[in-house]
Amino acid sequence: MGLIQELGIRVPVVQGGMGGGLSGHELAGAVSAAGGLGTIGILPVRELRLEIDAARAKTDGPVAVNLLLPFARRAHFAAAEQADVIVTFWGKPRREVRGTWIHQCGSPAEARAAREAGADAVIAQGVEAGGHVRGTTPALELLERVREELPDDYPVLSAGGIADADDVAGRMGAGAEAVVCGTRFLLSEESGAHPLYKARLLAARETILTELFGLGWPAPHRVVANAATERWLRRDRRGPSWLRALHRASAPLLSHAPMEGQLRLAAMQRPGRPLFGPAAPTAGGPESLLEAGPLYAGVCVARIADVRPAAELVHELASGLAS
Ligand SMILES: Cc1cc2nc3c(=O)[nH]c(=O)nc-3n(C[C@H](O)[C@H](O)[C@H](O)COP(=O)(O)O)c2cc1C
């Protein structure tokens, strides 16, 4: 029996964790209740605990928590132990929890390191992914290369560019244990994205791989255009070199600041003020982030035309697979 079945996941569709309130209990609970694996994104520890409890109230199925290694502290890992699966991202893979641990990787070398560190599975993230982008290779090619790198029975999940049933069937046919979708679930009724952020994504045809919103976290991320990108990315899509240097310098300090403070700082962002952190616009958060914050989305946003209930998405994504 594979890892997915062992965990009691009936449909091999995983909703990627999206931090800062984009994927909370409503989305994660709905995906897990529909038979997939829902994932709560990173939050301040107290909120994370509440979100896990609230997701449990919505489903008997397994629930995952996603932790970003630059920001996760010991208390985050302790809280995340209450979930069935912990997914980590961005940094040297290391086992911090006793339970099932999956690490999202961008290369075969990173996947091998995660397995050697004791990860139960890896997610191979292709360069077309939304949010922070570890991969530099298209997802299908990366999946094949990671599969070659690791033993046949080791579970490899595939992320990046998955928006419909054909995409899912393609990845499963190439040896994925399951698929991981971010952008498709961001455009669900239950995601915490601000309604106007969702509207921007529905209209978007192009994405930008940039480093503009890297204050405290200097890492490439994929977004759609807004006033901040129009103003600062004219010469270099990564952002001005002095701004990227500021991001690198700020990272050791800011990534250790309490997450609550980082979210408060985000409210002060303006398109003309080059202090751009990674918080995205959420339903309850400051509307100013629509023009001054990152509108994360993957390349597949161009193929998504509707906001749908998450359960419907789980069933539709898996509709091309033999049951
Ligand atoms: C809005 C958004 C936020 C994201 N936040 C996180 C995160 O907090 N942690 C993480 O591991 N991955 C994050 N990701 C990346 C996903 O885990 C996944 O790799 C990606 O969404 C797959 O590509 P897709 O967007 O084309 O489906 C995010 C993706 C998006 C779209």
Image: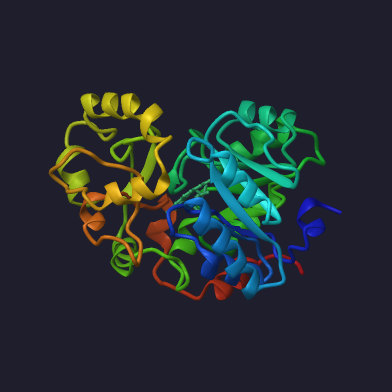
Residue 114 % position (x, y):
67, 32
Q: Is residue 210 left or right of residue 98?
A: left
Residue at (25, 53) in percent of width and height = 267
Q: Is residue 131 left or right of residue 2?
A: left
Q: Examine the image and state in which quarter residue 218 appears.
A: top left
Residue at (49, 60) in percent of width and height = 23
In what quadrant of the picture does the N terminus appear? Answer: bottom right
Residue 280 % position (x, y):
34, 53
| In this view, 71 is above or below 192 | above
As rendered, which of 286 and 44 lies closer to the eye?
Answer: 44
| In this view, 29 is above or below 21 | below
Residue 200 % position (x, y):
29, 62
Q: Examine the image and state in which quarter residue 240 appears.
A: top left
In what quadrant of the picture does the C terminus appear? Answer: bottom right
Residue at (52, 56) in percent of width and height = 46
As rendered, which of 59 and 222 lies closer to the eye?
Answer: 59
Q: Is residue 162 visible?
A: no
Q: Is residue 50 left or right of residue 197?
A: right
As rendered, which of 220 and 146 lies closer to the eye?
Answer: 220
Residue at (74, 44) in percent of width and height = 155
Residue 231 % position (x, y):
14, 42
Q: Is residue 149 visible?
A: yes
